[in-house]
Amino acid sequence: MEYRNLGKSGLKVPVLSFGAGTFGGSGPLFGAWGNTDIDEARRLVDICLEAGVNFFDTADVYSNGASEEVLGAAIKALSAGR
């Protein structure tokens, strides 16, 4: 994976990331984007990691925090070997 500097912060970030806005999608905005459940999220995260993508974009405002919960559960399941 190629990395680049984030401005002058000294932080290096990968050039590719994966947006998790559809994870746990609900409500008029995020529900229209999609409603990725834990099993599907686990599959997507696994594909990303196999391809070298290790930067996941999520925020507590995505479906009122459901995106972070689904992403966390997917990563936990992968780390447990499920």
Image (cartoon, rainbow, N blue to C red):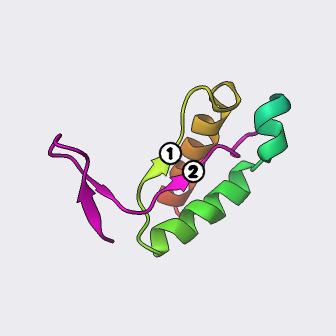
Type of residue at label 1? Asp
- x%, y% of residue 20? 60, 47
Residue at x-position 52% and y-position 49%? 76
Which residue occupies 79% across, 33% down? 29
> Viewed as shown, does residue 46 lie left or right of 43?
left
Q: Residue 19 carries which label?
A: 2
Helix, strand or loop at mark 2: strand
User: Is 16 inside the magenta-drawn segment?
Assistant: yes
Q: Residue at x 53, y 59 (%)?
A: 78
Asked if one can make out residue 26 in the rendered structure from this viewpoint, the answer is: no
Q: Is 30 within the magenta?
A: no
Residue drawn at x 79%, y 48% is: 34
Location of residue 51 in the rendering, given as x and y in whole percent from the top left corner: 47, 75
Judging from the image, what secondary structure is the residue with disc 1 in? strand
| Magenta stretch: helix, strand or loop mostly | loop
Residue that numbered label 1 is attached to: 57
Q: Which residue lies furthest to the bottom in this view?
A: 51
Do the residues bearing badges 2 and 1 touch, measured as CB atoms within 8 Å?
yes
Between 59 and 81, the one lying in front of the other is 59
Could you give the CA–CA distance between mark 2 and mark 1, rounded to whole angstroms? 5 Å
Quadrant in the rendering for residue 39: bottom right
Q: Give the range drawn in magenta.
A: 1-25
Identify the image quadrant of the N terminus.
bottom left
